[in-house]
């Protein structure tokens, strides 16, 4: 039984509270939280105040909805996201995308921290998603009843023009690669054997989010772009152990470049 609130009602709630008419939204994942500090004339509310939004509890995720001006445009920021590994359903994880559609958002940029599988990619680089592999084990459209078709073509989930814009938005000295992102359920990091398998499948980076949101946003007719901050080499690639604190530390080091990339993207999208 579908017991989630109506996305339209939550959209009305956010619109009234924040007086927001933005057409572009950015979801701030791990390593991207400082972008919120770059927004002028910001109005915000806690995620907990938005009906149907799951709690945001992961360290590095602020859990706020922010509307303001960035690069001369009004934008809506979702500062933090709920994750499947926290025990939330896929419907809860992706509910914000349905709300964005009801708000009239036409373009969404999804961001995340990811581990580099491709040996040519290094910590501190970025990757614009060209495609994905859903290895979470569940599809976000399964069992969800909406007026939209669940048989969605995924040939081009990530808009090629938006992806090119992300690559062009890199400041001097910053690398923005293009590649395939594989999503896993988490919360554990992957084993070296899994990473070797993922590499043979064509994956360039691995993370624990983004793909469910991308699928639902695409179903809703929103143009999707996605950007990974590569915070570490994936398990077994560099021979070092992984931990969330180091992921956040690298994300912090990359935050200035991340803000510049996203500001340039917003200006051109």
Image (cartoon, rainbow, N blue to C red):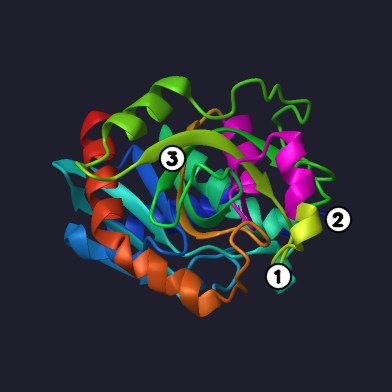
Q: Position of residue 128 (x, y in %)?
A: 45, 37
Label 1 belongs to which residue? 187
Q: Report the residue at 64% width, 64% height from top.
A: 83
Q: Nearer the viewer, mark 2 or mark 1?
A: 1
Q: Secondary structure at mark 3?
A: strand
Q: Secondary structure at mark 1?
A: loop
How many angstroms separate mark 3 from mark 2 (CA)? 29 Å
Q: Position of residue 66 (x, y in %)?
A: 32, 61
Q: Range of the magenta residues?
A: 195-220
**From where the camera sits, is residue 59 visible?**
no
Q: Report the residue at 75% width, 71% height from top.
A: 87
How many angstroms separate mark 2 from mark 1 (CA)? 27 Å
Left or right relative to 51: residue 199: right
Label 3 belongs to which residue? 108
Q: Is the C-beta separation of discs 1 and 3 under 8 Å?
A: no
Q: Quarter of the image holding residue 147?
A: top right
Q: Nearer the viewer, mark 1 or mark 3?
A: 1
Magenta residue check for 233: no
Looking at this view, is 213 or 136 the one in front? 136
**Labels 3 and 2: the sequence-earlier one:** 2
Q: Position of residue 116 (x, y in %)?
A: 55, 51
Is most of the magenta stretch helix, strand or loop? Answer: helix
Q: Secondary structure at mark 2?
A: loop
Looking at this view, is 200 or 79 the one in front? 200
How many angstroms separate mark 1 from mark 3 (CA)? 25 Å
The quarter in which the C terminus is drawn is top left
Left or right relative to 174: residue 4: right
Which label belongs to residue 1?
Answer: 2
């Amino acid at each position: 039984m579908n017991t989630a609130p109506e996305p339209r009602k939550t959209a009305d709630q956010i619109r009234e509270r924040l007086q927001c008419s933005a057409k572009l939204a950015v979801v701030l994942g791990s390593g991207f939280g400082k972008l919120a500090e770059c927004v002028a004339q910001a109005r915000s509310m806690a995620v907990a105040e938005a009906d149907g939004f799951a709690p945001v509890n992961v360290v590095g995720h602020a859990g706020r909805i922010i509307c303001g001006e960035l690069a001369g445009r009004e934008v809506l920021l979702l500062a933090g996201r709920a994750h499947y590994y926290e025990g939330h359903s896929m419907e809860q994880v992706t509910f914000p995308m349905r709300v964005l559609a009801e708000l009239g958002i036409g373009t969404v940029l999804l961001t995340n921290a990811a581990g580099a599988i491709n040996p040519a990619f290094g910590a501190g680089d970025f990757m614009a998603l060209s495609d994905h592999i859903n290895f979470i084990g569940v599809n976000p459209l399964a069992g969800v009843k909406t007026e939209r078709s669940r048989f969605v073509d995924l040939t081009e989930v990530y808009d090629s023009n938006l992806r090119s814009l992300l690559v062009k938005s890199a400041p001097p000295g910053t690398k923005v690669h293009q590649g395939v992102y594989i999503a896993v359920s988490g919360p554990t990091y992957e084993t070296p054997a899994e990473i070797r398998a993922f590499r043979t499948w064509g994956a360039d980076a691995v993370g624990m989010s983004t793909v469910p949101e991308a699928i639902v946003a695409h179903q809703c007719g929103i143009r999707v772009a996605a950007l990974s901050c590569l915070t570490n080499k994936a398990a077994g690639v560099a021979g070092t152990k992984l931990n969330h604190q180091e992921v956040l530390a690298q994300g912090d080091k990359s935050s200035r470049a991340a803000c510049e990339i996203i500001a340039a993207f917003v200006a051109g999208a």
